[in-house]
Image (cartoon, rainbow, N blue to C red):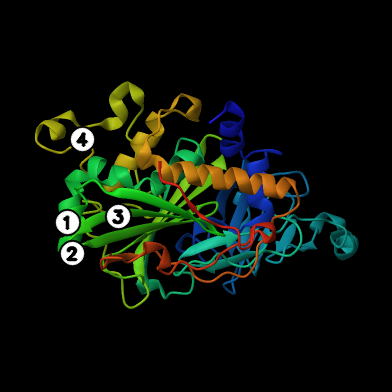
């Protein structure tokens, strides 16, 4: 990892290539749908270093504009939300949910004619998986991402949002790094494994890690020997650039989503949730979080390095491994923040179990190069699902599901499994 690579992966603001890649080729999740109430207060959205405003109109449609009013740039977070439009409280400019200025009171009889010439940066959106997604690029939006939970009913979803004070790659890499689960989250694993003896017996063991490049990103597999020559397989599906999918127990139709979205170079949103395609998701269990929390501000960091980010050393002495006993996600957030605002990857010393992270970085750098060469554009994609199962002797995990995802035409038919260090 060179300084240039680290810069390319982490910087998203201004004209940074990674930010342009995200804007030009991807739908970006930006808010919980539940926070947008018809005729309710407009909500702030910060993505890739820029500020936006989202609101739900009287008829249920969602609008997303630049936060600044096109007149004198007062914040539209202060605007009145009524009659399917935002009305700026400064001079009364009224902008309908489609982004059209429809009224300029100060112009009197010329209001309609003047309004026709005013431009508002309004962005396409869709709602899926309990989230609002936005396309910030020019031209025709890409296909929706190939995710299994986008069209599920609300009762089949549990989705949260958290704010992390560090670069988005630190969050993303945490979601791909399945190695840390058996170590950092060990005080929670007993409860997480309650529904599957195989999981409970194997998450503490050391697996072999293998990874396969895909058109949409990578598939990272943790492989553990079980029984008479069988292999317990858990795959993490990384759908570039934001999404990691982790399986549930013994099913490809439920699991856990992690979506790491850059707000700017030094902060990101984590959308964490559960989905089940076959039935309701039960109330969030105490094995994930032991206290009720605001779903829009879920994982918490209590302080800074000065107080060890709120670490409870007494809880550690009493047997909790990390000293963050309230919520599993707190552990992830604190560790990522402890790396600094943008960690220096040139000083890392990676090992064989980091193969998934190394390949994800390489795939992103490859995608940036493909964009620079004019080779990358999204195509229709099959739904991607992670795998959790025991394969019989001789089985190959690479033959399990996965989908085809976003395709770089120049790379079609050339994908090979990446070697394991």
Dot 3: what SS? strand
Give the residue displayed 39% in from the left and 36% down from the top. 336
Determine which quarter of the picture holds residue 160.
bottom left
- In the rendered structure, the answer to whether residue 73 lies left or right of residue 78 reads right
Q: Nearer the viewer, residue 393 or 403?
A: 393
How many numbered callouts?
Answer: 4
Figure check: 107 above or below 140: above
Residues under numbered marks 1 and 4 in contact, where contact means CB atoms less than 8 Å apart: no
Query: In x, y percent, where is residue 413?
Result: 61, 63
The kind of secondary structure element at disc 2 is loop
Q: Real-space Cα distance between discs 1 and 3?
A: 15 Å
User: In terms of sequence position, does the residue under pointer 2 or pointer 3 come before the other?
Assistant: 2
Residue designated by label 2 = 196
Q: Which residue is mark 4?
A: 323
Q: Position of residue 223 (x, y in %)?
A: 30, 54
**Which mark sits nearer the N-terminus, 4 or 3?**
3
- Residue at 17% over, 56% down: 200
Pick whichever, 316 or 46, lies toward us: 316
Q: Please identify the quadrant where the C terminus is shown.
A: top left
Mark 1 or mark 3: name the one nearer the start of the chain. 1
Determine contact: label 1, label 3, CB under 8 Å: no
Residue underneath mark 3? 223
- The answer to which image quadrant residue 27 occupies is bottom right
Q: Badge 2: few (under 14), some or many (20 or more) residues near its Cα, within 10 Å?
A: few
Q: Are marks 2 and 1 in contact (CB under 8 Å)?
A: yes
Label 3: few (<14), some or many (≥20) within 10 Å? Answer: many
Question: What residue appears at the point 32 percent right and 66 percent down from the top-left corner?
Answer: 395
Measured in 3D between alpha carbons, the distance from the residue under mark 2 to the one under mark 3, in whole angstroms, is 16 Å
Which residue is tagged 1? 200
């Amino acid at each position: 990892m060179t300084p240039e690579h680290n810069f390319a992966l982490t910087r998203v603001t201004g004209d940074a290539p990674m930010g342009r890649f995200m804007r030009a080729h991807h739908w970006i999740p930006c808010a919980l749908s539940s926070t947008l109430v018809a005729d309710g207060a407009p909500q702030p959205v910060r993505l890739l270093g820029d500020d936006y405003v989202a609101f739900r109109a009287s008829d249920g449609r969602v609008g997303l504009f630049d936060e600044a009013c096109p007149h004198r740039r007062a914040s539209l977070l202060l605007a009145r939300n009524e009659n399917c439009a935002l009305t700026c409280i400064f001079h009364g400019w009224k902008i309908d949910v489609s982004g059209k200025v429809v009224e300029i009171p100060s112009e009197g009889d010329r209001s309609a004619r003047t309004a026709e010439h005013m431009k508002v940066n309004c962005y396409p959106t869709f709602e899926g998986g309990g989230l609002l997604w936005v396309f910030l690029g020019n031209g025709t939006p890409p296909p929706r991402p190939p995710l299994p939970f986008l069209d599920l009913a609300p009762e089949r979803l549990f989705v949260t949002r958290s704010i992390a004070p560090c670069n988005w790659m630190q969050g993303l890499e945490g979601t791909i790094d399945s190695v840390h689960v058996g170590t950092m989250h060990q005080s929670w694993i007993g409860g997480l494994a309650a529904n599957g003896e195989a999981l409970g017996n194997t998450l503490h063991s050391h697996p072999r890690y293998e990874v396969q490049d895909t058109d949409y990103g990578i598939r990272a597999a943790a492989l553990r020997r079980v029984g008479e020559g069988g292999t317990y397989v858990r795959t993490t599906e990384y759908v570039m650039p934001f999404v990691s999918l982790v399986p549930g127990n013994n099913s490809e139709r439920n699991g856990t989503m992690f979506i790491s979205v850059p707000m700017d170079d030094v902060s990101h949103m984590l959308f964490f949730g559960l989905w089940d395609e076959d039935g309701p998701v039960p109330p969030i269990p105490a094995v994930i979080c032991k206290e009720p929390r605001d779903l829009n501000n879920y994982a918490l960091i209590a302080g800074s390095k000065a107080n060890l980010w709120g670490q409870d050393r007494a809880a550690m002495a009493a047997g909790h491994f990390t000293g963050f006993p309230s919520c599993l996600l707190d552990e992830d957030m604190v560790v990522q923040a402890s790396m600094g605002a943008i960690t220096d990857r040139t000083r890392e010393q990676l090992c064989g179990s980091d193969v998934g992270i190394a390949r994800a970085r390489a795939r992103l750098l490859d995608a940036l190069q493909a964009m620079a060469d004019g080779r990358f554009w999204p195509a229709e994609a099959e739904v991607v699902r992670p795998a959790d199962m025991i394969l019989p002797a001789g089985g190959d995990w690479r033959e399990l599901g996965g989908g085809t995802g976003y395709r770089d035409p120049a790379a079609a038919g050339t994908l090979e499994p990446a070697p394991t260090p």
